[in-house]
Image (cartoon, rainbow, N blue to C red):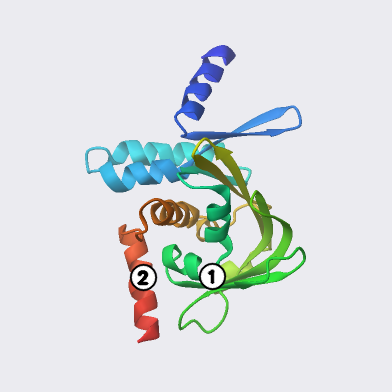
């Protein structure tokens, strides 16, 4: 393929929301957007389309080899309501598998995230930039297991952009060590899908993965 043909192809994928582009100086980097792909998978993938899904997974790994993960989703809501859903403990618990979030959301403050019945925090970090309702930058240290805890601290950036009566939410998980296990960043598609479902319908996500987490939290509190 020519460079022009590749550019046209990438532009079509961007318009469809399946690819997210980010500029870094003179470079324009492209990443597969796992969130809408996951939504399609949950609803439509069968044994006949499984090989196609496997091909996309391989392409995603190839394009994102630099260990910077970018996730994009459009949600029919306002920036203020979306910011509240990200930072309010009561709302966060509804779509994030019953998580318990603690922070005062000031620059330089700390935050912790854990589930009911857990011995300690699952994630902890520092709020580096707090600019409601547009941008939140946090360090991210996973603590839910030995392998996760061995990984170096990474960074998560939430960016909210109003688009008509909706919002474009981009979550960038970067500063990941080369070869970081997928468990460190692999849960974002399900979390963001749950966030979208809650804000647009008032209901919790009922995919097998989210139900699994929900049952685990229920057992922990009984």
Q: Is any atom of residue 67 visible in this view? A: no
Residue 40 placed where, x, y %? 34, 41
The residue drawn where x is 48% and y is 65% is 91
Q: Nearer the viewer, residue 65 or 110?
A: 110
Are the residues at dot 2 and dot 1 in contact (C-beta closer than 8 Å)? no
The residue drawn where x is 40% and y is 41% is 37
Q: CA distance from mark 2 to mark 1?
A: 16 Å
Using a 10 Å C-alpha cutoff, classify the residue at mark 2 as few (fewer than 14 neighbours), some (14 to 19) or many (20 or more).
many
Location of mark 1 (residue): 89
Residue 187 placed where, x, y %? 47, 57
> Which of pointers 2 and 1 indicates the residue nearer the eye?
1
Q: Is 101 placed left or right of 218 in the picture?
A: right
Quarter occupied by residue 136: bottom right
Using a 10 Å C-alpha cutoff, classify the residue at mark 1 as few (fewer than 14 neighbours), some (14 to 19) or many (20 or more).
some
- Mark 2 or mark 1: name the one nearer the start of the chain: 1
Residue 115 placed where, x, y %? 48, 76
Q: Nearer the viewer, residue 187 or 160?
A: 160
Quarter occupied by residue 126: bottom right
Element at label 2 = helix
Q: Is 53 placed left or right of 142 in the picture?
A: left
When the figure is inspected, residue 119 is found, relative to residue 43, above or below; the finding is below
The residue drawn where x is 45% and y is 40% is 58
Numbered tag placed on residue 127 in the rendering: none
Q: Residue furthest bottom?
A: 222
Q: Nearer the viewer, residue 61 or 206?
A: 206
When the figure is inspected, residue 103 is found, relative to residue 204, above or below; the finding is below
Q: Is 48 placed left or right of 100 in the picture?
A: left
Location of mark 2 (residue): 214
Residue 67 placed where, x, y %? 62, 47
Count how many numbered circles sit on residues in the image.
2
The residue drawn where x is 51% and y is 33% is 19
């Amino acid at each position: 393929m020519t460079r022009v043909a590749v550019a046209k192809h990438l532009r079509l994928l961007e318009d469809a929301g399946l690819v997210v582009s980010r500029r870094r100086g003179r470079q324009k980097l492209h990443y597969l957007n796992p969130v809408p792909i996951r939504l399609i998978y949950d609803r439509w993938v069968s044994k006949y389309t499984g090989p196609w899904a496997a091909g996309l997974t391989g392409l995603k790994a190839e394009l994102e080899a630099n260990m910077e993960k970018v996730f994009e989703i459009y949600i029919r809501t306002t920036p203020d309501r979306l910011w509240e859903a990200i930072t309010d403990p009561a709302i966060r618990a509804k779509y994030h598998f019953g998580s318990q979030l603690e922070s005062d959301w000031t620059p330089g403050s700390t935050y912790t995230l854990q589930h009911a019945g857990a011995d300690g925090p699952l994630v902890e970090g520092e709020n580096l930039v707090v600019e409601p309702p547009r941008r939140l930058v946090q360090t991210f240290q996973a603590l839910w297991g030995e392998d996760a805890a061995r990984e170096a601290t990474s960074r998560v950036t939430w960016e909210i952009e109003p688009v008509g009566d909706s919002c474009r939410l981009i979550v960038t998980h970067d500063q990941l060590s080369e070869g970081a296990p997928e468990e460190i960043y692999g849960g974002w598609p399900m979390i963001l899908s749950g966030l979208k479902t809650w804000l647009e319908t008032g209901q919790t996500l009922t995919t097998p993965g989210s139900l699994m987490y929900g049952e685990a939290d229920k057992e922990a509190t009984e």
